[in-house]
Amino acid sequence: MYIMRNLVTGPKGQDHWFLLILITTVLVFSSCWYAISQNIHTVIPHLFYIPVILACWRFPRPGVLFTFGIVSGYAGLELFYNPQMLLDPDVILRCLIIIFIGMVVAYLSLYLHNREKSYLRLLSALDTGVIVTDRSGRIFYSNPYAIRVLDRKAGSLSGSSLLDYAGNETDLKEFLEKCQQNGQSDTTKELVLKRNDGFPVPVLLSGYQQKGEEFILTLNDLSEEKWLAHELANDRRVMTTLIDAIPEGIFLSDNSGTIIGINRSCMELTGWNEGTSLSEKTPGPFSGELSGNIRNALHQAVREKQPVTINLETLSEESRRHYEVSLTPVYDSLNSVNRVAGVIHDITGRENYLKQVREREEYLRMVLDGLPFATVVINPDHEVLSVNQALSMLFEREVDDLIGTTGHGHLLYPAGERPMLSDLMIEDEVDILLDEWYEDLYLPSPTVPGAYEVIDFFPHIGEGGKWIKSTSSRLVDEKGATIGAIETFEDFTSLKATEETIRISEERFKIASQIATDLIFEYDQETDQILWFGGVEKWLGLESSERVSTMTSWTNLIHEEDVGKVKSAFIHHVLTGEPIKEELRIKHRSGLYQTWVIKAVALYNTNFRQIKTVGIVSDVSEIRANEEAKRKALITIEKYIEQFAILNDHIRNPLQVIAGYNDLQGGEYAREIASQIAQVNKIVDQLDKGWIESESIRDFLRRHYGIKIKD
């Protein structure tokens, strides 16, 4: 019997065992009953061992209970026929022996059950099929692997014949016969079996015969191995085709430098073939020293177990070629290097391109050094790519050591107070970062779209610090991807000083205009805008200066008789640059007119181009009113003088007549009348003297105050 013959019978014999144990138990009880009834107590009770052993062997756990049942039955028989026998030591010992035998048999049965299950689990877990057959090929046992190989739908192959699965029955019979001849020595043969569906399965069968009885066979499915071998052969052909189609030269060598495999491109390029040894003189462009360089690099790759790359240059009458040879060690299962794979790249085009790139970089570096602005260029990793001499001069330090580092931020911010503008430009959220680090400092560049600029004071640069304007822009490639950023720096210290001077000057100008009694104006000839200083709205009684903020709106308030001459004066001034001096009348909000005197000159830029007109306005309304009052007073005085002259004539003529008549008449009153006439004459003389003095005063006013009297 083979090891898997079920020393503990399987469930298929359960009914038979029940019947066998039952019959045995009945026979034993009947025999013991009869013996005890005949007062035989020594030999016959030992028959109870038989059903106990059978029950505990076949059914270990229920058998234990069965044992106690047998003992109880036996004790009952003894009690029934002779109660004193229950206290007999032989009966007690006999009961204990029955229980002991049942327990031992149950334990051994359980142990064998567990061993059998462990064997079955082991055989089920194997990735090798196990089959037990008799000499005719009838299968007693097969593990799951064998079932999957021969019949994927069946739950068990037991009872079927192995010959039913033979692809060639003769070959299988010969194999079984050979196993029988070899006995317990292994016999191995590769056969083709077939499943129930007729699909052929290549297998490797190994087997031996166990003590002239059953065959123990092991089965390995070679389908995957055959398929892999087929695919490997196909892959090798495909790989060879692909490798031959690769334009780069590819070769495989052993550790000594002998070529094992090589593609067509490598053959054409180097002149090597399979079997070529790099230790010997090789033909082609890689002969001599170049071949030695490849051999040394190959030995280095084997020794260091690391890929090695070397560059070679060949020179022929036609051209100069550049090659890159990459050597990669190939490891075996023991992690030892037993092969070296090599790839030969023709990098002539790349080298020529790199040469052009280097020349262009050198040219750009020269251009960058020639720029008047201090400049730094960084890559997306915030590393400095390039700097120029202007940067060194501005920051008064060497800057070449910044190339390849991320230390450019210390130029402006030694303590790392904030990142540079260029560092922000290569990030995604530029606007958010600018608001975070440069709030109220940055402005969009007016000349470069997408660029930003910052003007700030840095006290640690130079003596007394410097005002520096930073302008940064993102650098992108033709696809719009960010490849870096550029930042320029300008020294705005002198400009800031100029701005401060101008600011102070403007502040003085504003203060002066507020203190002065005259108005100051600035006329922009291009925009037609007038900027007033000194409160023009108060002069004209307006709410704001908007009513007179342009030349057009201002002239609308000028007296219509004066508009023409004012416009002509400004046009002549713009064309010739000559100063303006005009007197005009302008309407107040109340409806009255004021008299203004304008004096203005041209303002020129650095190109001597007239850009603005600056002037002052004086209000001479009160002066002109006083002059008018004086003129009217002089006219009145002249009228009075004329009236005095007429009055003198009218007084003197009658007095002369009266005096002559008095002299002719005489009389007692003639003396007294003559005295009165003399008194009146004296008064008239005083009036003539006053008229003369008034005439002198009139001439003085005309001479010194320019008062003219219109007729």
Image: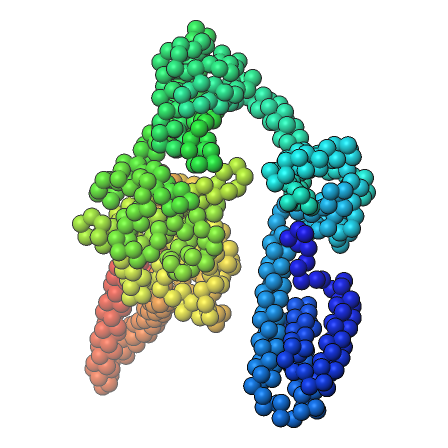
- Which corner quadrant of the image does residue 282 belong to? top left
- Which corner quadrant of the image does residue 305 belong to? top left
Q: Which residue lies furthest to the bottom in this view?
A: 83
Q: Which of 70 and 288 is in front in this view?
A: 70
Q: Where is residue 509 in the image (x, y as percent from the top left)?
A: 30, 59
Which scheme is used to colour this image of the protein? rainbow
Q: Which residue lies at the image location 62% right of the left edge and 66% below the top edge? A: 109
Q: Could one spot residue 177 in this view of the protein?
A: yes
Q: Is 129 left or right of 546, judged from the image as shown? A: right
Q: Where is residue 142 in the image (x, y as percent from the top left)?
A: 70, 50
Q: Which residue lies at the image location 29% right of the left edge and 41% below the top edge? A: 402
Q: Position of residue 57 (x, y in %)?
A: 65, 68
Q: How many labels does the image show?
A: 0
Task: Determine whether 613 is above or below 703 in the image.
Answer: above
Q: Which of 554 and 233 is in front in this view?
A: 233
Q: Could one spot residue 639 in this view of the protein?
A: no
Q: Which residue lies at the image location 42% right of the left edge and 31% below the top edge? A: 337
Task: Determine whether 365 is above or below 66 in the image.
Answer: above
Q: Residue furthest top?
A: 317
Q: Position of residue 499 (x, y in %)?
A: 30, 52
- Which corner quadrant of the image does residue 119 belong to? bottom right
Q: Which residue lies at the image location 51% right of the left edge and 42% below the top edge? A: 481
Q: Which of 48 and 375 is in front in this view?
A: 48
